[in-house]
Each structure stands twice: as C-alpha cells, then as structure tokens.
Image: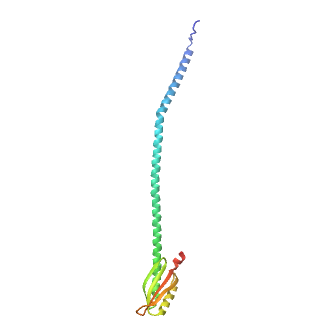
Amino acid sequence: MIPFINLLPWRKQYRQRQLRYWSLLAAGCTLSVTLTGIAGPALLAWQGERQRIQAEYLSQLRVLLQRKLQQVQLLEKRQKLQEARKAQRLSVSEWEQRLTRLASLLPAGVWLTSLSMKSGQVVVHGNAEKPEEVRLMEQNLRRLAGIAEVAAKGIQRNANGSLVFTFTFVSAEAGHAD
C-alpha cells in the first residue's frame, strides 16, 4: 500500500498550531510550578515577618497599657492620699475650733494637764480648785459641739489639796463611724 501524503497546507498549519498550543501549555505549567516553588517560601517568610511585627506591636502595646495602668493606679493613690489629707486637715480644723471653745469654757480655777486622742476617744486630765468647777467642766464638755458620751473617770485630791480629774469623751464623728 502506498502511504497517504497530505499535501494540503492548512493541515500543516493546524498541526503547527496544535504543537505551539501544547508547547505553550506545557511551558506555562512548568513556569507556574517553578514560580510556586520559588514564591511559596517567600510568601511563608513574608507571613512570618508579618506575624513577628504583629507580635512585637502587641508586646509594645501591652507594655504601654501596663504603664498606663500603673499611672492610673498611682493617680488614684495620690487622689486618695489628698482626700485623706484634706479630711485630716478638716478634722484638725474642727478640733482646733472645739479645743478653742473648750478653753473658753474652762472655769477660772481649772487647768488642763494633758489631752490625748486615740480612735476618736479623747482623754482629758486636769486640775481644779473646787468640786463645783469640776461639775461645771463636765457640763461644759457635754455642751461642746461634736462631743458625745462624756464620762468622768476619776476625781481625786492630790497632796496640794487640789482636785485631779480625768474625763473621757467620744467624738461624735467616731460614734457615727461604728
């Protein structure tokens, strides 16, 4: 048998187009596999770098937030301290007024030897010439503003013949705090 020879030019062109098509497809596949092989590690490195930057940013943000929290706590502590000092100054001012009033209410023959305060309880030690002056002193203490529960803890005569007395009373603020 005689081989069949295709002499038509369009069949040759068709075969060349098909050959080019499959060659380009194979080259494209090879190129995409190569690019994927090259770009994959670069993409992973980029993602790793991005995660590292995010972690660093979060760490810095955490440090800044901790500093801010410490500053807020310090500010609150200072404000509480200022409020306590203000309350203390007010209390001292009130006691200064009370003690000035107490001094003005002291009978002529009475003098105080000591005055102490602990936890809102005030202890007054003093001397008097006459028993009436001690009673008057107790009445004056009861009339003093901001004072509650006045009690005489002891009245005695000393060697000089004068009366030594002790009064205790509670500040009205301490009575309300309990």
Please state which of residues 95 and 12 is positioned toward the viewer in this rendering. 95
Vertical order, 11 against 31 (above or below): above
The image quadrant of residue 157 is bottom left
Q: Quadrant of the N terminus?
A: top right
Taking the view exactly as shown, the residue that stands out farthest to the left is 160
Q: Residue at x 45, y 68 (%)?
A: 81
- On the image, the x and y values in percent for residue 48 come to 47, 42
- On the image, the x and y values in percent for residue 168 come to 49, 83
Number of callouts: 0
Q: Residue at x 44, y 80 (%)?
A: 116
- On the image, the x and y values in percent for residue 20 come to 52, 21
Please state which of residues 143 and 129 is positioned toward the viewer in this rendering. 129
- On the image, the x and y values in percent for residue 165 come to 46, 88
Which coloring applies here?
rainbow
Please state which of residues 166 and 82 is positioned toward the viewer in this rendering. 166
Q: Residue at x 46, y 50 (%)?
A: 59
Q: Quadrant of the C terminus?
A: bottom right
Q: Residue at x 50, y 82 (%)?
A: 169
